[in-house]
Structure formats: C-alpha cells, structure tokens
Image (cartoon, helix red, strand yellow):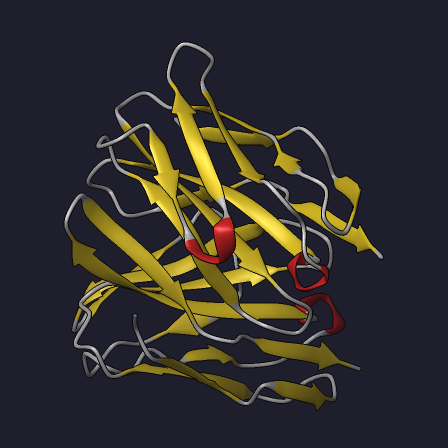
Amino acid sequence: EADIYQTPRYLVIGTGKKITLECSQTMGHDKMYWYQQDPGMELHLIHYSYGVNSTEKGDLSSESTVSRIRTEHFPLTLESARPSHTSQYLCASTHKGQGGDTQYFGPGTRLTVL
Amino acid sequence: AQSVTQLDSHVSVSEGTPVLLRCNYSSSYSPSLFWYVQHPNKGLQLLLKYTSAATLVKGINGFEAEFKKSETSFHLTKPSAHMSDAAEYFCVVSDSGYSTLTFGKGTMLLVSP
C-alpha cells in the first residue's frame, strides 16, 4: 500500500486565477504521475516524473506544468485557469514490487473553473 | 503501442448474482494488466494485477481475473455481487518496464437489491 495525498479535494475558482494542485507521497517512490479524468471517461496521462528534477509530458496535451524538487512532492500548476480545465486530476506514484511496477492513486482533486 | 477495450460501458446485476466485466487488450510486449475500481468521488483502488505469473489472478473483495493470451482478454469476475461493489471499473495495460498505463474507458457496475 502507498499513502498518496492530494489537496485540495475540491476547488471552485474563477477564470484567470493561478492554481496549484498538491500531491505528496510518503513512501519514497521515485516515479510519480498526473492524470486528468473527465466525467464518465478514462484517465489520460498529462505529466510524469522519474525522480527529482525529472518531468515529462504525457499522452494528453495539457497547459499545466509540474515540478519535482523533492522526491515526495509533485505539484501541478495552472497559471491561468479556464473553464476547459474543469476536470478531475489524479496523482499516482509507483511501487516497484515483485512482478513489476504498480501505480497507487491519490483521492483526486475535482477542479471547477467558472 | 498498447490499447484497452472495455466491451461494456454499463453492466447491471442483481445482488447475489455473478459479475462479469469484459476487457480486451493489445500490446506489443508482454503486458502487465490491472483492474482498478473507482467509487464515486474517490480515487482509484487497485483490485488486482497480472504480471506473467499465474494466469488466474485473485484480488481483493472476492474479485478475480483470468489472463487469456490467445484471446487477448483479461475479464474480471466475481461469483456473487454485493451492493458495495457498485462502482466504475477500469481495465489497464502497461508495457513491461515502461510504467506508463493505458486505461480503458471504464465499465459502470450497477447492483440492484
């Protein structure tokens, strides 16, 4: 099991605001991920990191940015929120166990941009 | 390239009856396969995973899945549904060693009394 924390759980904000979604894990996992999930849809990978100072863009293009200054922390930032950013954002980290990697997910942040 | 197809967007069962959620995959390499469950307003919880060991994988809450390479399938089953099983279920494939996941579109399981 992995403990992954995301804050805030819910956020309603106006257009043009800068927001940062927090994600942290206490298990020392090197690999971390951000997914975007629209209602009733599958998850799409938007960012991932293989360790400190490593960040990569995922399969789905996103206007958000991420940073990885510490192993346990992987925040996601939107410089200027728009209604099109309304979605659920899920953070995950990878535990390398027997038989390969397994991703564990945080509870998610549900973002609404008015 | 890898992909996942969940054949049913919704499955409705009565409490106490069997559950079958279907999943087909394609992968260029030996895949790792997962089933995750997502309850309303919650994150994803890992149910079970297949990583080239036994083809019949047992997970939490009485769920199990069978990896069938010839059919490229990884269907999720449970002998007897419980009301608390009502949730959305995602089949996921990962090419071995790359750690990036490809998700299916999800199957919503509805359980009636």
* Residue nearest the viewer, comparing A81 with B43: B43
Q: Is residue A112 left or right of residue B29?
A: right
User: Quadrant of residue B86 in the image?
Assistant: bottom right
Q: Residue furthest top?
A: B70
Q: Residue at x 66, y 78 (%)?
A: A111
Q: Quadrant of the N terminus of chain B?
A: top left
Q: Residue at x 37, y 73 (%)?
A: A66
User: Quadrant of residue A19 in the image?
Assistant: bottom right
Residue B4 position, x and y percent, is 52, 31
Q: Is residue A8 above or below residue B25?
A: below
Q: Is residue A112 left or right of residue B74?
A: right
Q: Is residue B54 above or below residue B84?
A: above
Residue B66 position, x and y percent, is 43, 29
Residue A73 position, x and y percent, is 29, 83
Q: Quadrant of the C terminus of chain B?
A: bottom right
Residue B12 position, x and y percent, is 80, 43
* Residue nearest the viewer, comparing B35 with B96: B35
